[in-house]
Image (spheres, rainbow, N blue to C red):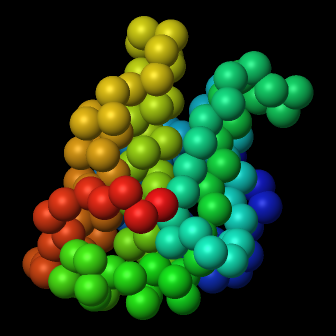
Amino acid sequence: MFDPITPEEFFAIGEIRRSPVIGRHLIDLEDSEEILVRIFAVDGRSGWNTIHKNTPHAQLEAVIEYDLNLAKSLYPRLYNVHVTLTHLLAHELGHIWAGFKSWKTTGNPPSEDLSNAESLAWENAMRGVGPYRLVHGKEH
C-alpha cells in the first residue's frame, strides 16, 4: 500500500507495475497488509529509503524520500545515464523489496550488497534496452 502519492508518482508506479520483470513484486508489496510505503518529494536527497519495524501503521513501514531535480543533475555525471521519476522510484522500491523479503524470511534487514543489487535490478528493468546504471553510489 502506498501513502501519500501524487499523480506523477501514481503514473510512475503504474509503469513499474506493468513491467514484466518486476511488476509482480510491486503488486506483492501493494497487496501486502504487512508493509506501508510512504513516498515524499523533498529537497536535497537524490533518493533515499528506510524501513521501520512495528510502527502504529503497519508491521513494516517504508519511507522513500527523493529530489528528482537533484537526481537529474547527479545521474549523468555519476552514472552516465539520465533518470526519470519511474527510474528513481523503481530503484528505491528495489531496496524496499529486498528489505521486505529479508524481514519476512529472516527477521533481519538485507545485506547492503543484496539491497544495492536489487535496487539496480529494479531500476535497470525500467530502463528497457538501456543504457543501464552499472554501479550503486553513496550519494543518497
Q: Is residue 15 visible?
A: no
The quadrant in which residue 123 appears is: bottom left
Indicate the position of residue 67 as horizontal and vertical percent values: 59, 77
Closer to us: 107 or 16: 107
* Residue furthest right as drawn: 56
Q: For the point 63% across and 62% down, which residue is it?
A: 65
Q: Is residue 10 left or right of residue 23?
A: right
Q: Is residue 126 visible?
A: yes
Q: For the point 38% across and 26% down, which residue is it?
A: 110
Q: For the point 80% across and 26% down, which residue is it?
A: 55
Vertical placement of residue 139 versus 33, above or below: below
The quadrant in which residue 25 appears is: top left
Q: For the point 78% across and 61% down, which residue is it?
A: 4
Vertical placement of residue 40 versus 6, above or below: above
Number of numbered callouts drawn:
0
Vertical placement of residue 63 versus 103, above or below: below
The quadrant in which residue 8 appears is: bottom right
Q: Is residue 14 left or right of residue 33?
A: left
Indicate the position of residue 132 as horizontal and vertical percent values: 16, 73
Vertical placement of residue 95 versus 8, above or below: above
Indicate the position of residue 97 as horizontal and vertical percent values: 44, 40
Closer to us: 46 or 59: 46
Indicate the position of residue 39 as horizontal and vertical percent values: 68, 60
